[in-house]
Image (tube, rainbow, N blue to C red):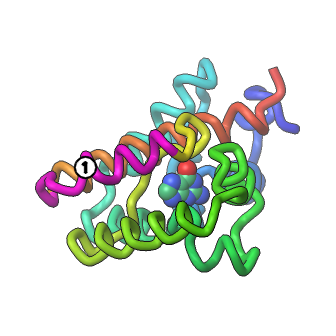
């Protein structure tokens, strides 16, 4: 487990290897943030990563959003998630759904994806399954730019928790 000091001294490849997974299937966020070292705190490092994500072109942000698996989706059932995604879905209880709950997730996922063209993103570690289903219904009427921004804000929360998992204090 690296400390902040280790990360501040790391070369670009080591920095990306340590932090590349913070943003799902998108190591470019960490790689491009490397030039911003040194970071005075975990919060400052997280803020720099998020600023890099926010400064990226919209199509790159959209690819990042689309890199996320559906919650309780096909990839989860086939056990094809990254280690972090698996832990996040388990923490929300999504590996223990009844058939009816699974059908409801599938319906909501498909409806959301059809409306926005990207998967529903919520920080699964901060929300249990009932809260996730409620948020899916509540956010469905939103406009596209608002949902894109909400997805990016949730991705920032996911990255913060993933950073805390790997940072030695
Ligand atoms: N898709 C929607 N929410 C999440 C989450 O918290 N983690 C991952 N990996 N994918 C998601």
* Residue at 54% from the left image edge and 61% from the top image edge: 101
* Residue at 59% from the left image edge and 26% from the top image edge: 39
Figure quadrant, ligand 1 = bottom right
Residue 54 x/y as whole percent: 32, 48
* Residue at 67% from the left image edge and 48% from the top image edge: 93
Quadrant for the N terminus, please: top right
Principal secondary structure, stretch drawn in magenta: helix
State yes or no: residue 118 in magenta: no
Residue sitting farthest toward the right: 1
For residue 78, above or below residue 39: below
Q: Nearer the viewer, residue 125 or 10?
A: 125
Residue 133 x/y as whole percent: 42, 50
Residue 32 x/y as whole percent: 51, 54
For residue 151, above or below residue 102: above
Give, as a single range, the part of the protein colored magenta: 130-144
Number of marks = 1
Tell me the SS state at disc 1.
helix
């Amino acid at each position: 487990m690296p400390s902040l000091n280790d990360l501040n001294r790391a070369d670009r490849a080591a920095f990306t290897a340590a932090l590349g997974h913070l943003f799902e299937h998108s190591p470019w966020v960490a790689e491009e943030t490397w030039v911003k070292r040194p970071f005075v705190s975990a919060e400052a490092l997280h803020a720099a990563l998020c600023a890099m994500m926010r400064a990226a072109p919209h199509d790159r942000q959209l690819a990042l959003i689309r890199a996320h698996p559906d919650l309780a989706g096909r990839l989860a059932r086939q056990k094809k998630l990254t280690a972090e995604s698996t832990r996040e879905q388990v923490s929300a209880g999504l590996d223990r759904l009844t058939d009816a709950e699974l059908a409801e997730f599938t319906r909501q996922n498909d409806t959301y994806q059809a409306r926005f063209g990207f998967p529903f993103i919520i920080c699964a570690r901060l929300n249990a399954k009932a809260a996730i289903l409620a948020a899916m219904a509540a956010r469905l009427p939103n406009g596209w730019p608002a949902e894109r921004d909400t997805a990016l804000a949730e991705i920032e929360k996911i990255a913060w928790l993933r950073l805390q998992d790997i940072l030695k204090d």
